[in-house]
Amino acid sequence: MLKLAKLNNRPEIFHSIQGEGKNLGKPSVFIRLSLCNLYCKWCDTDYTWNWEGTSYAHNNDALPGYHKFAKDEMMALLSDDEINAIVTDYNCKNLVITGGEPLVQQKSLISLLQLLRQTNPLYHIEYETNGTFIPLPEVDALSDQYNVSVKLSNSGVEYNERVVPEAISWFATSPKSNFKFVVDTNDDLNEVQQIITDHKISNEAVFLMPQGSSVESLQQKQNWIVELCKQYNYNYSDRLHIHIWGAKRGI
Ligand code: SF4
């Protein structure tokens, strides 16, 4: 059984396009798992971890009506068969396992991955991960791609929690990995370049994206980031879902 995020009282599995990174624009089925081991203060999937009774600060704390989430209301427990049936109905080859942090539940993921592979050996299975867990060998053997987004100090998360050197180095040596960083300031860029240097990450495996949850805020940063990508041979990634839908969930 896996804990999935819940949206409109249904498990959050949806058919859309990949909005970021290496597979930008690719039709994909997203499987959003609940739970995260971090607590980024700007997280837009805080309904996967910012539970009532916890003391984590969030940028939305100041918004009228914002409150922490009741775990029982935001989480759905599904069997592998139930998840497989929903995914199969979409008839889509690219699967994105996201969260929260999907590798929090990686032991429970193994049997789902086996079932998905049996159902359709042509599935391409990718993850959105914060890069703090080394995938288990059984998970890695059944997976195609890791989109690794190591969190920076602007997340408000303690360094030792968001930067796990052995995990980042594992991903840096895996041909399945690419690294996605959202940057807003020169300080962010300096941190990114320190992580790249410390862990010998290939520049060609790096995607830089502008910070922002509106088209205007993305556009303000895009020229600066494009020039950085040209200078360092990084890849530029837009955040396509924001251009199309804004900061909406489940689409
Ligand atoms: S790692 Fe991702 S899901 Fe977890 S708190 Fe940070 S942004 Fe949110």
Image (cartoon, rainbow, N blue to C red):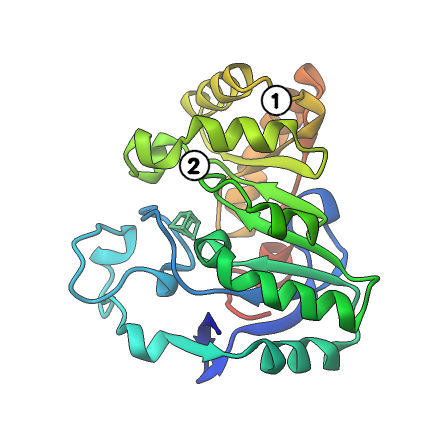
Q: Is residue 145 left or right of residue 159?
A: right
Residue type indicated by callout 1: Ile
For label 2, being within 8 Å of ligand 1 is answered: yes
Disc ID at residue 201: 1
Q: Amino acid at mark 2?
A: Lys
Give how far apart the Cα atoms at labels 2 and 1 are: 15 Å
| Side of 15 relative to 69 (left or right) | right
Q: Nearer the viewer, residue 22 or 160?
A: 160
Residue at left offset 51%, top offset 30%: 168
Residue at image coords 53%, 79%: 79
Question: Across the whole image, how many numbered discs are drawn on residues?
Answer: 2
Q: Which residue is found at the position 22% from the left and 57% from the top?
A: 61
- Residue found at the very far right of the displayed protein: 122
Quarter of the image for residue 159 reads: top left
Residue furthest out toward the front: 138
Residue 22 position within the rendered picture, expressed as x and y whole percent measured from the top left: 72, 42
Which label sits in the foreground, 2 or 1? 1
Which label's residue is closer to the chain start, 2 or 1?
2
**Image position, residue 112 (x, y; %):** 61, 68
Res 30 seen here: no
Q: Which residue is mark 2?
A: 151
At label 2, counting other C-alpha atoms closer than 10 Å, the crowd grade (few under 14, some 14-19, many 20 or more) is: many
